[in-house]
Amino acid sequence: MRIEKTRLTLVVGVLGTAMTVLATLDSANAQRRGRGGPPTVPTQEQWEASAEAQSRVATAMTLAGSDLRPQAESFCSATGPLRLALARQAAGLPPIENYTIEPTRVFDNMYFIGMSSQNTWAITTSEGIILLDTLNSADEARDVIVPSLQKVGLDPADIEYIVIGHGHPGQSDHTGGALYLQQTYGAKVMMHPLDAAQVLPNQRPDRPLATPDSDAIPGETLTLGDTTVTFVHIPGHTPGSLGVIVPVTYNGTPHTVMTFAATQMPTRETLMQFERTFYEFARPMNVEAALNFHAGGLQDDFTLLESIRNDRSAPNPYLYGPERFDRWMSIMIECGRARLAAMGR
């Protein structure tokens, strides 16, 4: 294993920006206040009344063309994209039952593991597994992650590293299974120190959290065997929300993908950090796909996963290609600027 420190100037700037992030976005209700901060998204009335916001929406739609129109419509709304549970709640629909999704080998060296509510990603390397996120609890780690890994022929004892994408004070989604995996298999846990500082003192007594073995710092890389992943900063949902850029192959052809712990950008500072992450990391590294931790949060994961399970000889539906993904990033930024304009920021 090797952790490398790179782009130190950027890292210092990233940490300084993150210290200004005080609110956690709750996209399910644009009227609610974030934890300790002002509203993080505009009201529908503000959104529709802002000429600048609507102008930026028009720009985003032009960027979208015909092939990215649904994605642009999702991002260019008052709330931005919502994960499935929150979208149903916002629409006044009843919740759907949470269930385990068939574990899926999305890329040759990367697997979708988890549930309809949220998921993890398992990256296989020549020296073990890097697991991204851990579901809600020790029970879900034991009863969902472990058997799902085994079902696709992976040994949970091979988990060497767990990278937590983000954490919330008083909640355990994404972080809840880490302690079980740390204690049972000796996996080393990594997390952004800003989120760890918030989460660990405010954990649920019935769901104790793992103490990180090391920090996941944006701009640094983690190497395990033949695979090196890069940590990047995407704050706004939480101060320490992380993206992870991962080299993958699909049917032997190399590609680069990025996981998103969150996509919300409620302040000018966090939006600027998204831009830096996209233009200083994702673009030069030729990222081609966005992967998230709530199925349906960025795309229709259920349909995409089923299509891969049915026909691995077909083109991978997650892969946009660098040019199309670059437009997708630009759409996300333009829609974030529109929400800020609607709030007068």
Image (cartoon, grey):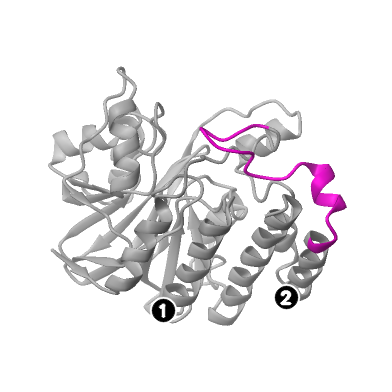
Evaluate whether residue 181 shows in this view. Answer: yes
Q: Secondary structure at mark 2?
A: helix
Between 77 and 131, the residue placed more toward the observer is 77
Q: Give the residue type that dot 2 points to.
A: Leu
When the figure is inspected, residue 175 is found, relative to residue 224, above or below; the finding is: above
When the figure is inspected, residue 322 is found, relative to residue 298, above or below; the finding is: below
Q: Is residue 134 left or right of residue 278?
A: left
When the figure is inspected, residue 81 is found, relative to residue 86, above or below; the finding is: below
Q: Based on the displayed image, in which of its 4 quarters is residue 124 positioned?
A: bottom left
Q: Is residue 220 left or right of residue 90?
A: left
- Residue 65 at x, y percent in the picture: 76, 75
Q: Give the residue type that dot 1 points to.
A: Met
When the figure is inspected, residue 154 is found, relative to residue 319, above or below; the finding is: above
User: Could you classify mark 2 by the number of other residues whose Cα lies within 10 Å: few (under 14), some (14-19), or many (20 or more)?
Assistant: many
Residue drawn at x 62%, y 43% as measured from the top left: 40
The boundaries of the magenta stretch are 32-52
Label disc, if present, on residue 285 of the rendered structure: 1
- Residue 19 at x, y percent in the picture: 39, 50
Q: Main secondary structure of the magenta part?
A: loop
For the C terminus, the quadrant is bottom right
Between 175 and 138, the residue placed more toward the observer is 175
Q: Is residue 105 left or right of residue 310?
A: left
Residue farthest top in this picture: 206
Label disc, if present, on residue 344 of the rendered structure: none
Q: Is residue 294 left or right of residue 212?
A: right
User: Could you classify mark 1 by the number of other residues whose Cα lies within 10 Å: few (under 14), some (14-19), or many (20 or more)?
Assistant: some
- Residue 28 at x, y percent in the picture: 65, 36
**Which residue has dot 2 on it?**
63
